[in-house]
Structure formats: C-alpha cells, structure tokens
Image (cartoon, helix red, strand yellow):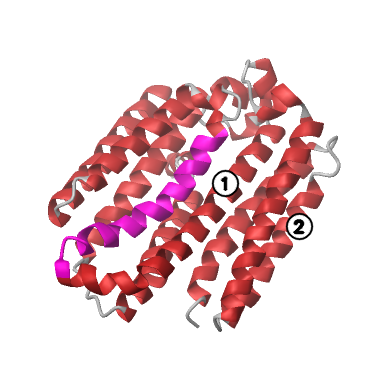
C-alpha cells in the first residue's frame, strides 16, 4: 500500500487532477457555450474525450517522473524529506514507468487523431513530450528558458483542448460557416485564459526557483535567482504579478460589462490570493515564505481557471 502512495506522490496526482479539471472546464464550460450559441452540434463522443484526457494526464505524469529522476541531486539539498527516487522507488522502475506513460500518452493521441481525422493531436502530444524531456535534461538548468517552456506548456493545454473542438468543426463547411460569427469572441476568451495560464505558471516557476536557490546553486543550475540574486528576482516577480493582476482586472471589467457578474465577483478571490502571494515575497530571508507564495500561486491558477464555470451563471 505504501508503494502505491509513493507512486501517487511521484506522478503528482493532485496536479493531474487539476489538469483534468482544466480540460473539462475549457471543453464543457468555455468552448461548448459558443458552439451551442452558433447552433453547432459537436461530433465528439465520450471515447474521444477520454482519449484526450488520458493523453494529457499520461504526458504530464511522465514529465513529473523524469523531472524527479533528473533532480535527485538538487532535491537531496532542497527537500530531502520529499525525495522518492532511489529511496522508495528504484530509479530503474521509474524510468520504465516514464517510457510506458510516454508510449501510452502518444498511443492515445494517435488513436484520437485517427478517430477525428486530424494528425495534429498526435503531433502536438509528440511536441509536448519532446519539450518536457528537453526541459528536464537541459532547459531546466538554463537561464529563464526552462521557466518559459513550462509556462508555454501551461498555455498550450488551453489551446490543445480548444483545438479538440475546432479542428474537426472546420472540416465541415456548414459548421465552419456557423462558427464564423462567434469565432472572434471565442478566440478572445481563449487567448485571455491562455495568457492567464502562461503568466501564472511563469510566476510560480520563478518562485519555485527562489525556493530551491541553495540546491540549484550547488548543482550548477543557472536559474534566474542564481544568476540575478533574490532581490532582483523578487522585483521581476512583482512586475509579473502586476501584469497578471492587470490582465485579470481587465477581464473582470469585460465580464461585468457583459452581464457575467458571478465570474466577475469570483475572480476577486483570485485577485486576493495573488496579492497575498506577492506580500509573502517581501521577506527574502525566510525560505518558508517562498514555499507559501508558491502554494498560493497554485491556488491562483486553480481559482482563475474555476472562474470559467461562473461565466454563464
């Protein structure tokens, strides 16, 4: 039973559940209302949706495993109590699990591409797997590149789910014609949430680097906090937080003007969490504040995405 617990921790089951929630919210609560308003019947069944979800989850779980395999030396310094590889799970087993998950995720994407007559699902999954592997092996140790890669993949998930509906619809001339009147507005909303995912992921990744400064420095990683120091990095994070806050406030104004008061009000929770996260960074000598700020940013990401469910209430 303990072995199962360690595997659950290794693949970050909580984060995977959050990704499943994002897929469902974007598909059912963000894209679907626009298609319904345009009178488009979506030609997807439960099997296609489950294949989409599984390809996302398997890819993310594989990435979490390879990250822990590569990060063993750093984790022994930064968080030895959370070290799993070669402590509770042999590295060889973890590597096999990584390969199996990459294979299953790619296979599910391939089947999805065949069912929906679009090779893009398989190609996108292959690109994601490649980027995540290079991130763990090289990008993660480079200045800023690793942070941007993770942020790009966070935004990419939003687009991937959107394409799940879009790529098939545009193949039908009638549905494509019906889509045109709502396409502009739907694209704007997708871009807003993708930008939110990008910025919130980038902020959290930089804060995590601040938290892991000691281990990253000793293992030669050129993260932002190692290269520029905590003081400059903190100022960069505050600038990013201000940018994200302005994006959220702008979206709240649009929601209010269009009668979506429920989503407008709910996003004040996100605003508050973002402010508290920024305040945690004021004392750079307390490492626990970085950890709390990182946790708060995860809640920012969660509540921001959850606001999708309130748009049409």
- Provide residue 96's location: percent of width, then percent of height: 32, 28
Does residue 203 sit above or below 84 in this rendering?
Answer: below
The CA distance from mark 2 to mark 1 is: 16 Å
Does residue 249 sit above or below 211 in this rendering?
Answer: below
On the rendered structure, is 106 left or right of 209?
left
Look at mark 1 in the image and give the residue it sits on.
201
- Provide residue 156's location: percent of width, then percent of height: 42, 48
- Provide residue 127's location: percent of width, then percent of height: 33, 36
Does residue 216 sit above or below 79 in this rendering?
Answer: above
Quadrant in the rendering for residue 256: bottom right
Q: Earlier in the sequence, mark 2 or mark 1?
A: 1
Q: Magenta stretch?
A: 147-173
Quadrant in the rendering for residue 261: bottom right
Residue at point 29% right, 36% down? 126
Quadrant in the rendering for residue 133: top left
Could you tell me which secondary element the residue under label 1 belongs to?
helix
Could you tell me which secondary element the residue under label 2 belongs to?
helix
Circle 1 packing at 10 Å, graded few (<14), some (14-19), many (20+), is: many
Indicate whether residue 145 is drawn in magenta. no
Residue at point 60% right, 30% down? 144
Residue at point 30% right, 70% down? 180
Residue at point 25% right, 74% down? 178
So how many labels did they put on this image? 2
Q: Is residue 5 visible?
A: no
Closest to the observer, 180 or 165: 180
Look at mark 2 in the image and give the residue it sits on.
275
- Provide residue 134's location: percent of width, then percent of height: 42, 26
Closest to the observer, 225 or 96: 225
Closest to the observer, 207 or 232: 232
């Amino acid at each position: 039973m303990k072995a199962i617990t360690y595997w659950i921790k290794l693949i970050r089951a909580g984060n995977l559940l959050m990704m499943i929630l994002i897929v469902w919210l974007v598909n059912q609560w963000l894209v679907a209302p626009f298609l319904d308003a345009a009178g488009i019947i979506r030609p997807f069944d439960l099997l296609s949706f489950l294949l989409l979800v599984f390809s996302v989850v398997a890819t993310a779980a594989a990435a979490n495993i390879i990250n822990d395999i590569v990060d063993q030396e750093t984790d022994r310094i930064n968080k030895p109590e959370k070290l799993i590889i070669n402590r509770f799970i042999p590295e060889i087993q973890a590597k096999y699990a990584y390969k199996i998950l990459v294979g299953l995720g790619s296979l599910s994407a391939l089947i999805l591409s065949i069912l929906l007559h679009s090779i893009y699902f398989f190609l996108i999954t292959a690109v994601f797997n490649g980027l995540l592997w290079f991130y763990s092996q090289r990008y993660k140790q480079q200045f800023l590149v690793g942070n941007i890669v993770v942020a790009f993949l966070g935004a990419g998930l939003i687009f991937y789910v959107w394409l799940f509906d879009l790529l098939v619809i545009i193949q039908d001339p009638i549905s494509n014609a019906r889509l045109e009147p709502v396409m502009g507005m739907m694209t704007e909303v997708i871009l807003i949430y993708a930008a939110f995912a990008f910025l919130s992921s980038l902020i959290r990744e930089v804060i995590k680097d601040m938290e892991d400064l000691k281990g990253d420095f000793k293992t030669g990683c050129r993260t932002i906090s190692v290269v520029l120091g905590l003081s400059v990095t903190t100022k960069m994070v505050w600038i990013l937080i201000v940018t994200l806050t302005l994006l959220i406030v702008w979206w709240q104004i649009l929601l209010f003007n269009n009668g979506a008061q429920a989503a407008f009000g709910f996003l004040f929770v996100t605003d508050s969490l973002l402010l508290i996260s920024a305040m945690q960074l004021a004392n750079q000598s307390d490492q626990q504040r970085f950890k709390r700020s990182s946790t708060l940013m995860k809640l920012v990401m969660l509540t921001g995405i959850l606001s999708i469910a309130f748009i049409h209430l």
